[in-house]
Image: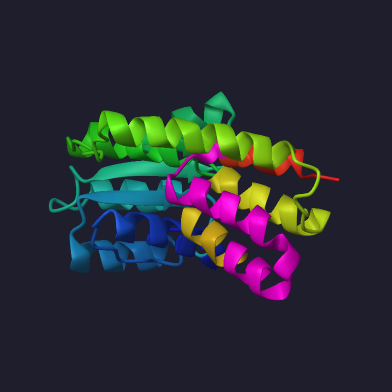
Amino acid sequence: MDDHEVNRAMLHRLLFHLGFEIAEATDGEDCLHKAQEFLPDIILMDLLMPVMNGWEATRRLRQLPELKDTVILALSANVYETTKQESILAGCDNFLTKPIQTNELLELLRLHLRLEWVYEERSPTKKRIDQTAKASSEIAAADSRMVSPASESVLALLRLAAMGDIEAILEETAKLEHSDATLVPFVHHLRQLAKGFQLKQIRDFLKQHLS
């Protein structure tokens, strides 16, 4: 639950592609109604919202027998220890700092929902090919002939990478590819990194192209 549509959309895309069924709420009061209807296994609770904040919504949810044991993760850009303590006292099970890092979210989902993430195994031949491709891509990234997008575009991509929003990165690369043919080598390399969910490599690559 988050009152910012962009944040909800990012989380929705990520969780949807992982196979979760999702219900969205725009504020604490809306969350109370949706939670009783949907009976979720986990609630992502933004703390600062209009109408009813996340702490109050959490306290009320804990009073409902059917939701008293539901996992609730508090979301906030405020990292003060008092904020975390207040969240736990209200009934939240854990705390995530915004902007949300994908790896941290996945780890908390694994921990609280007792999930096991299954990753695709690669054959030795595939690994050797990947290593060769990586070496080639690093050379390409350093090649001055690779045209870089405007700084504003690179910064926007960096923000998406910081949020772990792979789908949005792929959407932006498509726009860049159609807007300027000279950006095709840049787009191709970035797209390969995004498809492999290589967020650190994406950030490093984009930083090299900041003018």
Name the spot of residue 23 as percent of width and height, x first: 30, 66
Residue at 59% from the left image edge and 40% from the top image edge: 137
Picture quarter with the C terminus: top right
User: Of residues 201 and 97, which is closer to you in this image?
Assistant: 201
Q: In the displayed image of the protein, which residue is found farthest to the top?
A: 81
Question: Which image quarter: residue 103?
Answer: top left
Query: Residue 199, relative to residue 147: is it above or below?
Result: above
Secondary structure mostly seen in the magenta stretch: helix
Measured as percent of width and height from the top left, residue 149 is found at 77, 58
Was residue 196 drawn as part of the magenta stretch in this picture? yes
Residue nearest the viewer, comparing 184 with 40:
184
Which span is picked out in magenta? 173-201
Q: Residue at x 74, y 70 (%)?
A: 180
As drawn, 15 above or below 132: below
Left or right of 74 on screen, residue 142: right
Q: Residue at x 73, y 37 (%)?
A: 142
